[in-house]
Image (tube, rainbow, N blue to C red):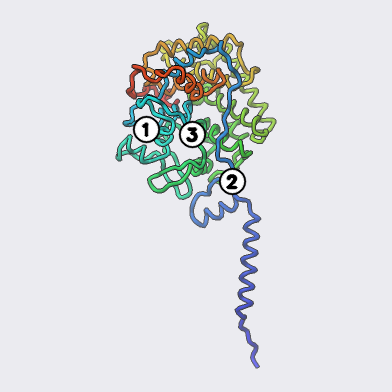
Amino acid sequence: MPRNNRISVKTTLIVQCLFIAAFATAWFCLSPNQQQRIEAEVRSRQPLADVNFTNRMPAAVLPFYDDATVVSDEDLAAVLTKVLPRFSREKLRPNYVEHALRIWGAQIEFDSPDLVSGPQMAQYLVNTGEYLASWGGDVEPILEPEPDGIRIRWGADLTASVHHDHMLASMAEAGVTLDTPVFTPARQTTMEQILSEALRDFRLDERETEWSAMAFGLYLAPQGTASWHNGQGRRITFDMLAERLMRKHRKKGVCLGTHRVYSLMALLRLDEENGSELLTAATRSQIMQFLHGARDLIIASQDPDGSWPPNWHEGADAAANKDPNEKAYRRVIATGHHLEWLAIAPKELHPPHDSIVRAADWIVQKTLQTPQSEINSSYTFYSHVGNALALWRKTSVPEFWKKWRADHPDAEHSDAAAEDSPENDDQDDKRA
């Protein structure tokens, strides 16, 4: 009799189950990055960054010093009055909102209806409806939904975020959590998807990495995540980010090269305060050497009036090489930003204390003597001044302001100009 070559249904099911089990075993033996790369190839998409977000609240880099010799309560209040977010709601520039949000925080509520509160600023950035209500329907939304994440539109356009990952870093500094709802033209999601997209999109050869380093550090340090893979499958570490920030000449980078210094100081602090898991010992040593160099240069370049020049990176040669056509606000940029990073730096990275006091005295008087309309047009620069001075009193801008306002109920009601004036036309400084 002929043999029966048919395979029973039971046997077929057993083979299929064994195959599925073998596939599942092989799949789970792959790293998350390998899984995502395979899935991305099947779906013809870029893979998301292979980060498991166990943390929702961003870290905060707190100041060390409460020094009334640097700035008094009265002078700090006067400076903060000049940088209150008194923006027009019509055609509100994202760059203004991001800078105001990072210093005033996402929770501050103002008594004056002429001021934009923290929740309003945050909603403007994460809610497309609020953004379009300000700009109208003829502009592209600032939030661009991707299949698995949200990309932020950035560039020189006044309707966009000016720098790559600046909005993300500002939200992190403002305390915006990763589970905060985000409303795009296509769907509702959360801040986690913005961070995921940023991690996936990051490239080491980008022109600006200052805010990527800040944002990634603030969100990832509390959960001890020191590396991830980007959309090209390349492993990225905070060591690499730090090396990238230190690679070029000190004059390179945004705001006269000062943001690189601040970001490096912040990474050191985040590493120290979160188990020393972000950076290797070698990288920590290199950053300290870089920051010691920055300290020596600002000691040598400081003007007798206490200000730091735009070419601070030239050290002792700065005065001789001064630009005869220097714009006044560029000195505000250098002095305000240096005071900001020094407030979160250990004393071994400080110039002599008298140098810090003179710089603060200069920047306070400069701010108070500057017409409000000029500060409005250069708001991004002066916001750093307000933040730096608050840090030197071991507080935050909103924390100090709420206490001051309680004793001075008319603090938010001034005759200061409320119009949102154009920013400076200088393309380099416009990227502050």
| Quadrant into which the C terminus falls | top left
Residue 171, label in figure: 3
View extreme (right): residue: 281
Considering the numbered disc 2 on the image, is that residue within a helix, a strand or a loop? loop
Q: CA distance from mark 3 to mark 1?
A: 20 Å
Residue 72 image offset from top left, x and y in percent: 52, 12
Disc on the earlier residue, 2 or 1? 2
- Does the residue at mark 2 contact the one at mark 1 (Cβ under 8 Å)? no
Asked if residue 357 lies left or right of residue 135, the reply is right
Q: Quadrant of residue 423?
A: top left
Rendered image: mark on residue 26: none
Q: Residues within 10 Å of mark 1 (few under 14, many from 20)?
A: few
Up the image or down, 195 lies above or below 343; here it is below
Mark 2 to mark 3 CA distance (whole Å): 20 Å
Q: Secondary structure at mark 3?
A: helix
Q: Amino acid at mark 2?
A: Asn
Q: Nearer the viewer, residue 283 or 185?
A: 185
Query: Disc 2 versus disc 1: distance between alpha carbons?
Result: 34 Å
**Among numbered discs 3 and 1, the one appearing first in the sequence:** 1
Asked if labels 1 and 3 touch by Cβ distance under 8 angstroms, the answer is no
- Disc 1 marks a residue whose amino acid type is Asp
Mark seen at residue 52: 2
Q: Residue furthest bottom?
A: 1
Please report the residue visible at 61 percent of the width from the left and 11 percent of the height from the top. Answer: 352
Q: Which residue is mark 1?
A: 157
Residue at horizontal 44 percent and vertical 27 percent from the top: 100
Q: Along the line of sight, which residue is nearer the eye, 156 or 76?
A: 76
Q: Nearer the viewer, residue 357 or 201?
A: 357
Q: Mark 2 against mark 1, which lies toward the viewer?
A: 2
Residue 114: name its quadrant: top left
Question: Of marks 2 and 3, which one's residue comes earlier in the chain?
Answer: 2
Instruction: Report the amino acid beneath label 3.
Output: Met
